[in-house]
Amino acid sequence: MSFCLPFAFPALANRTHLPAAAAFETAGARGLLLGTAVSVIVGGGLLAIGRRHRGGPLYQKEAMAIVGLSWVLATVLGALPYYLSGTEIAPDRPMTFIEAMFESQSGFSTTGATVITDLETPASVPHCILFWRSWTHFLGGLGIVVLFVAILGQGSAGKAMMRAEMPGPTKEGSMPRMQHTALVFAAIYIALNAILTVIYALEGMSLFDALCHAFGTMATGGFSTYNRSLGRFESASIEYTTILFMVLAGTSFTLLYLSLFGGPKRLFRDVEFRTFIGIILGVAGCIVFFGMRAGDVGFGTLSESIRNGLFQVVSIITTTGYGTADFDQWNNFGRGILLLLMFVGGCAGSTGGGMKVIRHVLFYKILRQEIERAHRPRVVRQIRIGGAPIDDPSLTQGIVVYFSMILAIFVFSWLFLITFEPRGTWGAVSQAELDDREENLSSRGQRQAKEQVAALVNEGTLDEKLLDSASAVAATLNNIGPGLGVVGATQNYAGFSQGAKLLFVWLMMLGRVEVFSVLVLIFPSFWRRI
């Protein structure tokens, strides 16, 4: 938080296409200073309590508790600058603490969903708070607990913490020492952020914009400093640069490390990376074809179509959520395939969220094996990844359990939203419009006419509610950010109720951290001494 304080001064708070701040941002600086003070008090209190207890080895159960509880604590403390600075989600509409937690969790979990309707008015969102918003992406991109591993190096517990922070099956070639691995990941991550910041600056961004968008790109988060996201710059070079670095951020950092010594060919020998690139190219090709055929916005010339289609596919599959075009206005195939793409995600060991490509590869192989067993029960065939057999039977079981868990969470969260979220979220119909529709109906009794009007009004709203709620759950659970309809590329989550925003906070945390590390916290047996 204190690192963001210098951006309260006008000299550092300029944005490329907007006038620089005219004066020192007192409210933003106050929020950051108070947030820093509270964090120091909480940290000091926990440190004092911890010193009373005898040290010892850290086991997997304690590591899981550290992962889950540290994310809860980071969400609450990260919300303080927003709340204490009086940041507004709309003019004269200050954030509630739940909304501040939503923005905090969205930053740390690198989701990029927001409740702020206007990012370009310093009176509503001070520049230093805007920088804090992007800085949470930087911290969350590598994982707060991975930084703990780098510092503590807690052996087997460190491995458990790292697996929870970078979920997905362990890849061949990972270095045995988790502390060394975490430090290498940190070095690669910081270096890529620095390189991208310089490139953005050379392409015309101010230092403020370059830093914020580099954090959002490499963390696959998607927070921008403009309401139109990267589309505000209208620059093909910036968009292609972002595509390249989003792909790098969605690639396993272990693989990036090994490719530094083994060359680029090491990347394409990896089955997960090949599948990742194949999905991007295949889906982008389909979106370009159907987009041009339907004459959608952004699909005029072939070069424009490729740029917009490729950018949006990479943005969704890497769970970045940046936007250069309003994909919610595209044809139904394009919207549908992007919704499905939200459940894919980046590679294991990357900053990307989602279910991870390697899990989909394994799930396909498991399904194919089970189908073969149905008609050839005596055949024994091992599942192989990159030519190497998978000898651990618990891994295949874990993949099936994980998919089932994600499906169950998605379904129950969707049912909760469509049941309890008020219809007003999708806009209310005025009395004048109601009267106008009533006059156009055949007169078969006043009561029957009103019922027909109500049916016409609610029909579209209910259809929108079903699809929009599903996309909102998918976008937060998989750390995408934007979805369809009321949470589309040009919309946000401000219209949802406070209860729904709390649900989204929980879903974003589940999506960023290994699911079980959060779910175990609600079971009393987890806290019971054995």
Image: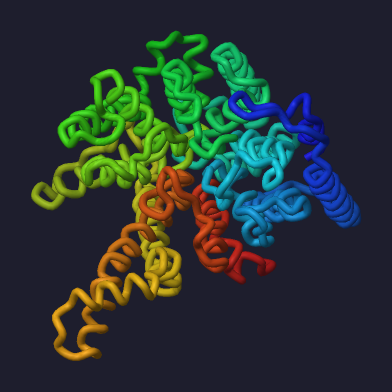
Say if residue 158 shows up in the picture.
no
Name the foreground residue: 139 vs 135: 135
Measured as percent of width and height from the top left, residue 184 is found at 63, 22
* Residue 19 pos. (x, y %): 67, 28
Q: Quadrant of residue 298?
A: top left
Q: Quadrant of the C terminus?
A: bottom right
> Residue drawn 46% across and 52% down?
477
User: Would you place residue 239 above or below residue 380 in this image?
Assistant: above
Query: Is residue 287 in view?
Result: yes
Depicted 493 relative to depicted 220: above or below: below
> Would residue 424 appear left or right of 218 to someone viewing this image?
left
Q: Nearer the viewer, residue 270 or 233?
A: 233
Position of 154 with respect to 105 (left or right) is: right
Figure check: 154 above or below 436: above
Counting from the top left corner in percent of width and height, residue 195 is at 60, 15
Residue plotted at (44% across, 69% down): 424
Q: Quadrant of the N terminus?
A: top right
Image location of residue 14, percent across then percent down = 69, 27
